[in-house]
Image (spheres, rainbow, N blue to C red):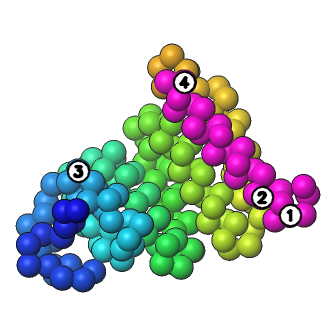
C-alpha cells in the first residue's frame, strides 16, 4: 500500500509548509478521500487546504467537495455541529454549480449527522428528501446505477431513522 503522505511526513500532522507545496486541490481531495476512513484528522487537514485553494480560485466544485470531505472528517472526529455546518456549505456549493446528484448525496450525510446528534425526526426528513429528489433524477443523464444507489441509501437511512424513532 502506498503512503498518502508526502515524503518525510509522519503521523497525522501536516506542516503548513507541506500543505503550501500541495496546491493542486484535486490531488488534495483525492488524498483526503483515500485517508478519510483511516485518518480523519489528516483527511480533514487536506480537505481544509483544498477548500482554501478552491475559495482563492473561485472554484465552487472544489469548495463543495472540500466542504463535504471536511464534514465527513469532522463527523468521524465527533465534531457533529461543525460537520452539519460544513454539510450546509457543501449543499449550497453543489447547488450553485448545478451538481444535483452530488447535492442530493450530501443529504445522506446530513441525515447521518442528525441521527448522531439524536435529532431523528430531522434526520428522517433529510433522508426522505434524498429519496424524493433521487426519484425525479434523469436516469438517462445521471445513470441508472447512480440513481439506484441514492435511492437505496436514502431508503436505508429512512429505515434507520424510523427504527430510532420507535416507528418500525
Residue at mark 3: 26
Q: Residue at x 33, y 65 (%)?
A: 35
Task: Tell me what residue is drawn at x 72 percent, y 59 percent.
Answer: 123
| Residue span colored magenta | 143-168
| Circles 2 and 1 in contact, beta carbons < 8 Å | yes
Asked if marks 3 and 1 touch (Cβ < 8 Å), the reply is no
**Residue beneath disc 1:** 165
For residue 12, above or below residue 66: below
Q: Residues within 10 Å of mark 2 (few under 14, many from 20)?
A: many
Labels 2 and 4: the sequence-earlier one: 4
Assess disc 4: are there few (<14), some (14-19) or many (≥20) residues with their C-alpha within 10 Å of its C-alpha: few
| Residue 91 percent across, percent down from the top left | 50, 50
Distance between the alpha carbons at the discs numbered 4 and 3: 26 Å
Q: Is residue 162 magenta?
A: yes
The answer to whether residue 29 of the structure is visible from this angle is: yes
**Of labels 1 and 4, the one closer to you:** 4
Which mark lies nearer to you, 4 or 3?
4
Q: Earlier in the sequence, mark 4 or mark 3?
A: 3
Q: Secondary structure at mark 4?
A: helix
The span from disc 3 to disc 1 (Cα, nearest Å) is 39 Å
Residue situated in front as seen by the camera: 118 or 58: 118
Q: Is residue 51 left or right of residue 122?
A: left
> Would you say 65 lies left or right of 166 here?
left
Figure quadrant of residue 8: bottom left
Q: Which mark is residue 161?
A: 2
- First in residue order: circle 1 vs circle 4: 4
**Considering only order in the chain, which callout, 1 or 3, is on the residue closer to the N terminus?**
3
Disc 2 or disc 3, which is closer to the eye? Answer: 2
Residue at numbered disc 4: 144
Amino acid at each position: 500500500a502506498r503512503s498518502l503522505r508526502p515524503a518525510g511526513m509522519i503521523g497525522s500532522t501536516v506542516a503548513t509548509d507541506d500543505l503550501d507545496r500541495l496546491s493542486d486541490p484535486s490531488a488534495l481531495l483525492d488524498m483526503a478521500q483515500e485517508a478519510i476512513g483511516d485518518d480523519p484528522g489528516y483527511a480533514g487537514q487536506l480537505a481544509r487546504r483544498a477548500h482554501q485553494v478552491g475559495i482563492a480560485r473561485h472554484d465552487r466544485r472544489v469548495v463543495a467537495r472540500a466542504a463535504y470531505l471536511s464534514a465527513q472528517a469532522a463527523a468521524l472526529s465527533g465534531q457533529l455541529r461543525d460537520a452539519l455546518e460544513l454539510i450546509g456549505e457543501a449543499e449550497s456549493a453543489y447547488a450553485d454549480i448545478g451538481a444535483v446528484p452530488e447535492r442530493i448525496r450530501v443529504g445522506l450525510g446530513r441525515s447521518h449527522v442528525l441521527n448522531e446528534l439524536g435529532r431523528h425526526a430531522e434526520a428522517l426528513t433529510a433522508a426522505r428528501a434524498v429519496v424524493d429528489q433521487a426519484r425525479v433524477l434523469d436516469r438517462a443523464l445521471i445513470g441508472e446505477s447512480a440513481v439506484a444507489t441514492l435511492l437505496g441509501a436514502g431508503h436505508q437511512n429512512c429505515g434507520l431513522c424510523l427504527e430510532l424513532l420507535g416507528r418500525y
